[in-house]
Amino acid sequence: MFFQKKEEAPVIDLENLPKHIAIIMDGNGRWATKRGLPRKAGHKAGAEALERVIEGARELGLQHMTVYAFSTENWKRSEDEVAAIMDLLRQYLKNYFRKFLGDNVRMDVIGDISRLDGDIQEQILEIEEESKHKDGLFVHIALNYGGRDEIRRAVEEMAKKVSEGTLQPSDISEDVISAHLDTKGVPDPELVIRTSGEERISNFLLWQIAYAEFCFTDTLWPDFGKEDLVLAIEGYQNRDRRFGGR
Ligand code: IPE
Ligand code: IPE
Ligand code: MG
Protein backbone atom coordinates (compact mmCIF):
# COMPACT_ATOMS: atom_id res chain seq x y z
CA MET A 1 0.00 0.00 0.00
CA PHE A 2 1.09 3.51 -0.76
CA PHE A 3 0.09 5.96 1.90
CA GLN A 4 -0.35 9.69 1.81
CA LYS A 5 -1.23 12.28 4.41
CA LYS A 6 -4.98 12.92 4.72
CA GLU A 7 -7.22 15.64 6.14
CA GLU A 8 -8.54 13.63 9.09
CA ALA A 9 -6.25 12.39 11.85
CA PRO A 10 -5.52 8.66 11.62
CA VAL A 11 -7.29 6.41 14.09
CA ILE A 12 -5.40 3.43 15.45
CA ASP A 13 -6.13 0.74 18.00
CA LEU A 14 -3.30 0.86 20.53
CA GLU A 15 -4.30 -2.54 21.89
CA ASN A 16 -3.59 -4.17 18.53
CA LEU A 17 -0.32 -2.70 17.37
CA PRO A 18 1.88 -4.81 15.13
CA LYS A 19 4.35 -6.60 17.40
CA HIS A 20 7.21 -5.67 15.16
CA ILE A 21 7.63 -2.87 12.61
CA ALA A 22 10.60 -2.87 10.25
CA ILE A 23 11.62 0.27 8.41
CA ILE A 24 13.76 0.78 5.32
CA MET A 25 14.93 4.32 6.00
CA ASP A 26 15.50 5.51 2.44
CA GLY A 27 15.87 8.90 0.78
CA ASN A 28 18.53 10.70 2.84
CA GLY A 29 20.63 11.47 -0.24
CA ARG A 30 17.72 12.88 -2.24
CA TRP A 31 16.61 14.96 0.74
CA ALA A 32 20.05 16.59 0.86
CA THR A 33 20.39 17.02 -2.92
CA LYS A 34 17.01 18.78 -3.03
CA ARG A 35 18.43 21.32 -0.61
CA GLY A 36 21.79 21.70 -2.34
CA LEU A 37 23.49 20.01 0.61
CA PRO A 38 26.09 17.21 0.61
CA ARG A 39 24.69 13.68 1.02
CA LYS A 40 26.14 13.42 4.50
CA ALA A 41 23.82 16.24 5.62
CA GLY A 42 20.98 13.96 4.55
CA HIS A 43 22.32 11.14 6.70
CA LYS A 44 22.54 13.49 9.68
CA ALA A 45 18.93 14.58 9.15
CA GLY A 46 18.03 10.91 8.76
CA ALA A 47 19.58 10.10 12.13
CA GLU A 48 17.50 12.88 13.69
CA ALA A 49 14.38 11.44 12.08
CA LEU A 50 15.25 8.10 13.65
CA GLU A 51 15.42 9.76 17.08
CA ARG A 52 11.91 11.17 16.55
CA VAL A 53 10.52 7.88 15.31
CA ILE A 54 12.02 5.94 18.22
CA GLU A 55 10.46 8.45 20.59
CA GLY A 56 7.12 8.09 18.78
CA ALA A 57 7.32 4.29 18.87
CA ARG A 58 8.03 4.44 22.58
CA GLU A 59 5.04 6.68 23.20
CA LEU A 60 2.80 4.32 21.24
CA GLY A 61 4.05 1.34 23.23
CA LEU A 62 5.53 -0.62 20.33
CA GLN A 63 7.50 -3.72 21.24
CA HIS A 64 9.96 -4.20 18.39
CA MET A 65 11.28 -1.92 15.70
CA THR A 66 14.00 -2.88 13.21
CA VAL A 67 15.61 -0.14 11.17
CA TYR A 68 17.78 -0.64 8.10
CA ALA A 69 20.72 1.69 8.61
CA PHE A 70 23.46 0.23 6.39
CA SER A 71 23.27 -2.68 3.98
CA THR A 72 25.95 -5.14 2.86
CA GLU A 73 25.67 -3.38 -0.53
CA ASN A 74 26.13 0.14 0.84
CA TRP A 75 29.94 -0.34 0.91
CA LYS A 76 29.77 0.32 -2.85
CA ARG A 77 29.22 4.01 -2.11
CA SER A 78 32.05 6.55 -2.15
CA GLU A 79 34.63 6.27 0.59
CA ASP A 80 33.61 9.74 1.75
CA GLU A 81 29.96 8.85 2.15
CA VAL A 82 30.70 5.57 3.96
CA ALA A 83 33.09 7.40 6.32
CA ALA A 84 30.44 10.06 7.04
CA ILE A 85 27.87 7.36 7.88
CA MET A 86 30.35 5.54 10.15
CA ASP A 87 31.20 8.79 11.95
CA LEU A 88 27.54 9.48 12.56
CA LEU A 89 27.15 5.97 13.89
CA ARG A 90 30.08 6.53 16.26
CA GLN A 91 28.50 9.72 17.56
CA TYR A 92 25.16 8.02 18.10
CA LEU A 93 26.71 5.07 19.88
CA LYS A 94 28.53 7.43 22.23
CA ASN A 95 25.67 9.83 22.93
CA TYR A 96 22.13 9.26 21.83
CA PHE A 97 21.94 5.48 22.14
CA ARG A 98 23.35 5.76 25.67
CA LYS A 99 20.72 8.35 26.56
CA PHE A 100 17.87 6.17 25.46
CA LEU A 101 18.96 3.39 27.77
CA GLY A 102 17.58 5.68 30.47
CA ASP A 103 14.21 5.51 28.72
CA ASN A 104 13.96 1.75 29.19
CA VAL A 105 14.81 1.17 25.53
CA ARG A 106 16.71 -1.96 24.58
CA MET A 107 19.00 -2.06 21.58
CA ASP A 108 20.82 -4.63 19.53
CA VAL A 109 22.42 -4.82 16.12
CA ILE A 110 21.65 -7.31 13.37
CA GLY A 111 24.09 -7.86 10.53
CA ASP A 112 27.73 -8.84 10.37
CA ILE A 113 29.46 -6.35 12.62
CA SER A 114 32.88 -7.95 12.08
CA ARG A 115 33.45 -5.68 9.08
CA LEU A 116 32.91 -2.51 11.14
CA ASP A 117 35.79 -0.66 12.83
CA GLY A 118 36.92 -2.17 16.14
CA ASP A 119 35.84 0.80 18.28
CA ILE A 120 32.34 0.68 16.77
CA GLN A 121 32.10 -3.06 17.42
CA GLU A 122 33.09 -2.53 21.05
CA GLN A 123 30.51 0.22 21.55
CA ILE A 124 27.80 -1.97 20.03
CA LEU A 125 28.61 -4.90 22.32
CA GLU A 126 28.65 -2.58 25.35
CA ILE A 127 25.25 -1.08 24.57
CA GLU A 128 23.76 -4.50 23.84
CA GLU A 129 25.06 -5.72 27.18
CA GLU A 130 23.99 -2.63 29.15
CA SER A 131 20.51 -2.56 27.68
CA LYS A 132 19.72 -6.25 27.77
CA HIS A 133 17.56 -6.04 30.91
CA LYS A 134 15.40 -3.17 29.63
CA ASP A 135 11.88 -4.27 28.84
CA GLY A 136 10.47 -1.31 26.91
CA LEU A 137 10.78 -0.79 23.15
CA PHE A 138 13.42 -3.09 21.59
CA VAL A 139 15.21 -1.33 18.73
CA HIS A 140 17.14 -3.53 16.33
CA ILE A 141 19.60 -1.67 14.12
CA ALA A 142 20.54 -3.38 10.86
CA LEU A 143 24.19 -2.57 10.17
CA ASN A 144 26.23 -4.20 7.43
CA TYR A 145 23.05 -6.23 7.14
CA GLY A 146 21.95 -8.24 4.13
CA GLY A 147 19.19 -10.84 4.19
CA ARG A 148 21.16 -13.20 1.97
CA ASP A 149 24.31 -12.75 4.02
CA GLU A 150 22.34 -13.47 7.19
CA ILE A 151 20.91 -16.67 5.70
CA ARG A 152 24.37 -17.67 4.43
CA ARG A 153 25.84 -17.22 7.92
CA ALA A 154 23.01 -19.24 9.45
CA VAL A 155 23.54 -22.07 6.94
CA GLU A 156 27.27 -22.07 7.70
CA GLU A 157 26.58 -22.33 11.43
CA MET A 158 24.10 -25.18 10.96
CA ALA A 159 26.48 -27.02 8.60
CA LYS A 160 29.20 -26.74 11.23
CA LYS A 161 26.91 -28.24 13.87
CA VAL A 162 25.97 -31.06 11.50
CA SER A 163 29.63 -31.85 10.83
CA GLU A 164 30.31 -31.82 14.58
CA GLY A 165 27.34 -34.13 15.11
CA THR A 166 25.39 -31.72 17.35
CA LEU A 167 22.61 -31.16 14.79
CA GLN A 168 20.87 -33.75 12.62
CA PRO A 169 19.96 -32.67 9.05
CA SER A 170 16.42 -33.92 9.64
CA ASP A 171 16.12 -31.59 12.66
CA ILE A 172 16.53 -28.48 10.49
CA SER A 173 12.97 -27.17 10.77
CA GLU A 174 11.82 -23.63 9.95
CA ASP A 175 12.05 -22.84 13.66
CA VAL A 176 15.64 -24.10 13.78
CA ILE A 177 16.53 -21.90 10.81
CA SER A 178 14.87 -18.87 12.48
CA ALA A 179 16.86 -19.60 15.63
CA HIS A 180 20.11 -19.31 13.66
CA LEU A 181 19.29 -15.91 12.21
CA ASP A 182 20.38 -12.59 13.75
CA THR A 183 16.73 -12.00 14.71
CA LYS A 184 16.47 -15.14 16.88
CA GLY A 185 13.83 -14.75 19.56
CA VAL A 186 12.24 -11.72 17.86
CA PRO A 187 8.75 -12.09 16.33
CA ASP A 188 8.70 -11.63 12.53
CA PRO A 189 7.87 -8.09 11.39
CA GLU A 190 4.16 -7.68 10.74
CA LEU A 191 4.58 -4.34 8.99
CA VAL A 192 7.41 -3.15 6.75
CA ILE A 193 7.61 0.54 5.85
CA ARG A 194 9.81 1.93 3.08
CA THR A 195 10.18 5.65 2.55
CA SER A 196 11.22 7.68 -0.53
CA GLY A 197 8.89 6.11 -3.09
CA GLU A 198 11.00 3.03 -3.85
CA GLU A 199 9.03 -0.21 -3.81
CA ARG A 200 11.64 -2.89 -3.29
CA ILE A 201 13.14 -4.90 -0.44
CA SER A 202 16.85 -4.28 -1.14
CA ASN A 203 17.93 -7.45 0.71
CA PHE A 204 16.12 -6.64 3.99
CA LEU A 205 14.90 -9.43 6.32
CA LEU A 206 14.20 -11.82 3.44
CA TRP A 207 13.25 -14.81 5.60
CA GLN A 208 11.36 -12.86 8.25
CA ILE A 209 8.99 -10.91 5.96
CA ALA A 210 7.24 -13.98 4.54
CA TYR A 211 3.84 -12.69 5.72
CA ALA A 212 4.54 -9.04 6.46
CA GLU A 213 2.29 -6.24 5.23
CA PHE A 214 4.00 -3.45 3.28
CA CYS A 215 3.57 0.30 3.38
CA PHE A 216 5.36 2.52 0.89
CA THR A 217 5.41 6.29 1.11
CA ASP A 218 6.89 9.06 -1.02
CA THR A 219 8.05 10.87 2.13
CA LEU A 220 11.83 10.98 2.29
CA TRP A 221 13.23 9.47 5.47
CA PRO A 222 14.50 12.74 7.02
CA ASP A 223 10.91 14.09 6.76
CA PHE A 224 9.34 11.01 8.35
CA GLY A 225 7.90 11.38 11.84
CA LYS A 226 5.56 9.91 14.39
CA GLU A 227 2.45 10.97 12.41
CA ASP A 228 3.69 9.01 9.39
CA LEU A 229 4.29 6.01 11.62
CA VAL A 230 0.75 6.26 12.97
CA LEU A 231 -0.61 6.57 9.43
CA ALA A 232 1.22 3.40 8.38
CA ILE A 233 -0.16 1.57 11.43
CA GLU A 234 -3.66 2.74 10.55
CA GLY A 235 -3.20 1.32 7.04
CA TYR A 236 -1.91 -1.92 8.51
CA GLN A 237 -4.86 -2.26 10.88
CA ASN A 238 -7.27 -1.96 7.97
CA ARG A 239 -5.72 -4.89 6.13
CA ASP A 240 -7.25 -8.33 5.90
CA ARG A 241 -4.39 -10.68 6.81
CA ARG A 242 -5.01 -14.24 5.68
CA PHE A 243 -1.79 -16.23 6.00
CA GLY A 244 -2.84 -18.52 3.19
CA GLY A 245 -6.18 -19.36 4.79
CA ARG A 246 -9.42 -17.81 3.63
C1 IPE B 1 19.22 5.76 3.00
O1 IPE B 1 19.26 6.90 2.20
C2 IPE B 1 20.42 5.65 3.89
C3 IPE B 1 21.37 4.60 3.52
C4 IPE B 1 21.19 3.73 2.57
C5 IPE B 1 22.60 4.53 4.29
P1 IPE B 1 20.03 6.93 0.81
O2 IPE B 1 21.44 7.39 1.07
O3 IPE B 1 19.92 5.63 0.12
O4 IPE B 1 19.26 8.05 0.04
P2 IPE B 1 18.90 8.07 -1.51
O5 IPE B 1 18.17 6.81 -1.81
O6 IPE B 1 20.20 8.17 -2.25
O7 IPE B 1 18.06 9.30 -1.66
C1 IPE C 1 18.37 0.27 1.39
O1 IPE C 1 18.47 1.48 0.73
C2 IPE C 1 19.37 0.21 2.52
C3 IPE C 1 19.13 1.14 3.62
C4 IPE C 1 18.11 1.93 3.76
C5 IPE C 1 20.14 1.12 4.64
P1 IPE C 1 19.38 1.66 -0.56
O2 IPE C 1 19.20 3.07 -0.99
O3 IPE C 1 20.76 1.19 -0.30
O4 IPE C 1 18.71 0.64 -1.59
P2 IPE C 1 18.63 0.67 -3.17
O5 IPE C 1 20.03 0.87 -3.65
O6 IPE C 1 17.74 1.81 -3.52
O7 IPE C 1 18.03 -0.65 -3.52
MG1 MG D 1 18.56 4.91 -1.19
Image: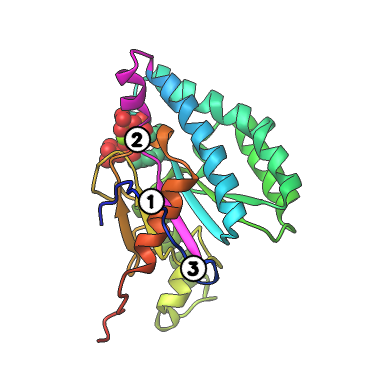
Amino acid residing under circle 2: Leu
Relative side of 244 to 42, left or right: left
Classify 10 Å Cα crowding around label 3: few (below 14), some (14-19), many (20 and above).
few
Range drawn in magenta: 17-38
Amino acid residing under circle 1: Asp
Secondary structure at badge 3 equals loop
Secondary structure at badge 1 equals helix
Alpha carbon distance from label 2 to label 3 = 26 Å
Relative side of 209 to 134, left or right: left
Q: Residue at x 67, y 49 (%)?
A: 128
Alpha carbon distance from label 2 to label 1 = 27 Å
Q: Height in image: 36 above or below 13?
A: above
Q: Which mark is residue 149?
A: 1
Check contact, mark 2 vs mark 1: CB within 8 A.
no
Say which quarter of the image contains residue 40: top left
Q: Residue at x 35, y 38 (%)?
A: 26
- Nearer to us: label 2 or label 1: 2
Residue identified by numbered label 2: 220
Q: Nearer the viewer, residue 9 or 134?
A: 9
Q: Is mark 2 within 8 Å of ligand 1?
A: yes
Is 181 in the magenta? no
